[in-house]
Amino acid sequence: MILAIVGPTGVGKTKLSIELAKKYNAIIINSDAMQVYQKMNIGTAKIKENEKEGIPHYLFDIKDVTDNYTVYDYQKDARNLIEKYKDRNIIFVGGTGLYLKAALYSYEFNEEENKVNHYDELTNDILYELALKKDANMTIHKNNRQRLIRFLNKENINVPASKPIYDALYIGLTCERSMLYERINNRVDEMFREGLIDEVKSFYDKKINSRILATAIGYKELYDYFDGKITLEESKELIKKKSRHYAKRQYTWFKNQMNVTWFDVDFDNFDNTIKEVEKYINEKAKKVIKFGINSHDENVVIGRLKKPIKK
């Protein structure tokens, strides 16, 4: 069985992944574009070692921030893991929809031109800057997001098909928008208390100006603060604002690109959300096993549960 836990930042995906991994004896594969990088811990809300509860986690902390790790690279690594652990239950967790779709759908990349970036995850300002770096004479307005992405993707990627190639069940976590934005704001405040400034300063002091640090929310804004372009309070408010906008784009992407079943999160008692998701998974698994349903015919893809752990 392959599960994919999706949704916007700050909604509880990591916590759900741990509980489901314990329930179904699963491994966890990261599908967050920023969490593949080492030492980007606080700013990416990366799972802490003591939170893993002994569950194997893959594609976390595998690259240096100076490495150019592309969607093409992620696709190869994720599919190798799927093949290696094909007899295990697998849980993908993360908010980078393009990574997840590259892993589980029939995306086809041109190997000679594999420098594909996760443009759907970037702000308009960053897209505009990248477009100017590609061609200083380009005339696309920075608010014309679709044209900027098409321009950046031109000659880098073949048009991908949208057919899933692995049986998987897509589980989305959601909540009322104002509640999510409040959680995001509080989360950013907590990041600063945990030492986000020191984390980013460790890169800045080494004069590391890699592509990933120039695009990751929380890092670019603090670089601007260290450069004296904005105040610390302005950097914090920008991080909150961009995180909220990113969450909105994540919702839009997953709702348009994948057949996700959404669950409203009970933050007062997260166990209720866990039980609701488990019930859904078990019902889908029983239906497939009992009736031999071809999951692709239903646009709901799930295989037989493998070696679940009984509580």
Image (spheres, rainbow, N blue to C red):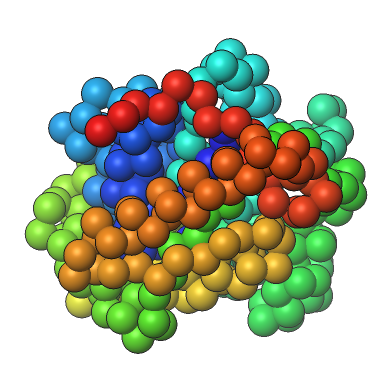
On screen, residue 138 versus residue 308, left or right, reads right
Residue 225 image point, x, y percent: 28, 65
Q: Residue furthest bottom?
A: 178
Q: Vertical placement of 62 versus 127: above or below?
A: above
User: As rendered, which of 254 and 98 lies closer to the eye?
Assistant: 254
Quadrant hosting residue 252: bottom right
Say which quadrant the N terminus sits in: top right
Q: Vertical placement of 251 versus 201: above or below?
A: below
Instruction: Count how many numbered circles sit on residues in the image.
Output: 0
On screen, residue 294 versus residue 228, left or right, reads right
Q: Vertical placement of 80 versus 73: above or below?
A: above
- Residue drawn at (64%, 68%) of the image: 255
Q: Vertical placement of 309 versus 120: above or below?
A: above
Asked if one can make out residue 310 in the rendered structure from this viewpoint, the answer is yes
Q: Residue furthest front?
A: 290
Residue 160 image point, x, y percent: 85, 47
- Residue drawn at (14%, 51%) of the image: 195
Asked if one can make out residue 8 in the rendered structure from this viewpoint, the answer is no
On screen, residue 142 versus residue 45, left or right, reads right
Q: Residue furthest top?
A: 84
- Residue drawn at (30%, 42%) of the image: 19
Residue 37 image point, x, y percent: 41, 35
Residue 179 image point, x, y percent: 31, 81
Say which quadrant the C terminus sits in: top left
- Residue drawn at (34%, 76%) of the image: 180
